[in-house]
Amino acid sequence: MCDPATAMAVLKVGGAVMEQQQKQKQSAAVAKAAKDAYFIKSKQSNLRLLQEQNKASEIKQDADLKALKAQGTALAVAGGAGVQGRNVDQLINDFERSEGVMTARVDSQLKGMKAQNEMDKLAFQSEAQNRINANPPPSFAESLFAVAEPLANYKLDMDEKNAQRSFDTGAG
């Protein structure tokens, strides 16, 4: 059977090793959770942008169809009334211009949404990195000192006991 000081030193070293392993596991778990959150948030943001793009496409198609119907109606009415020339051409151009303005506005909004999506994803990435950095894995030196400290204390305790014995026996 070993002396109590040796047993205590072994327990302290074992505890320090387990504590460092636990810190390593916790750090890995935080990193995984942060990365998962980043990917989920980015995916949601991309999906939201895709939905907006689909909506914009529908709006542009509706505007194009509305302009085509209006042009057709104007041409039919003008033809039925025997009107032709510059006024009819100007009316048709107005319909085309109106549809073009609508398309340009929708495209401009989409461009802004895309830029916002990219900024959101950068923010999500930064947030994940901050979470990872806030809980770093233990460094080699930290682990080494956590294990070496109980051993050094054991050595100092043993040296002190040996010095006390020597003093008590008068051998020193």
Image: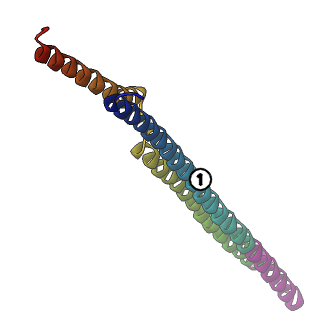
The residue nearer to you, when weighing 8 against 47, is 8
* Residue 107 visible somewhere in the drawing: no
Which residue corresponds to the image point at 38% horizontal and 29% vertical from the top-left?
147
Q: Where 78 sits versus 22, above or below?
A: below
Left or right: residue 60 compared with residue 101: right
Q: Is residue 93 magenta?
A: no
Highlighted range, magenta: 61-87
Q: Quadrant of residue 87?
A: bottom right
Q: Position of residue 171 (x, y in %)?
A: 14, 8
Q: Measured from the top left, where is residue 62 in percent x and y?
A: 76, 77
* Residue type marked 1: Asp
Q: Is residue 70 above or below residue 132?
A: below
Q: Tell me which residue sits at (52%, 56%) in the image.
A: 120
The reply to whether residue 167 is in sight is: yes
Q: Is residue 62 magenta?
A: yes
Magenta part, dominant SS: helix
Q: Viewer-proximal residue, 118 or 100?
A: 118
Label 1, residues with CA under 10 Å away: few <14, some 14-19, many ≥20: few
Q: Which residue is mark 1?
A: 36
Residue that protrudes farthest toward the front in the picture: 169
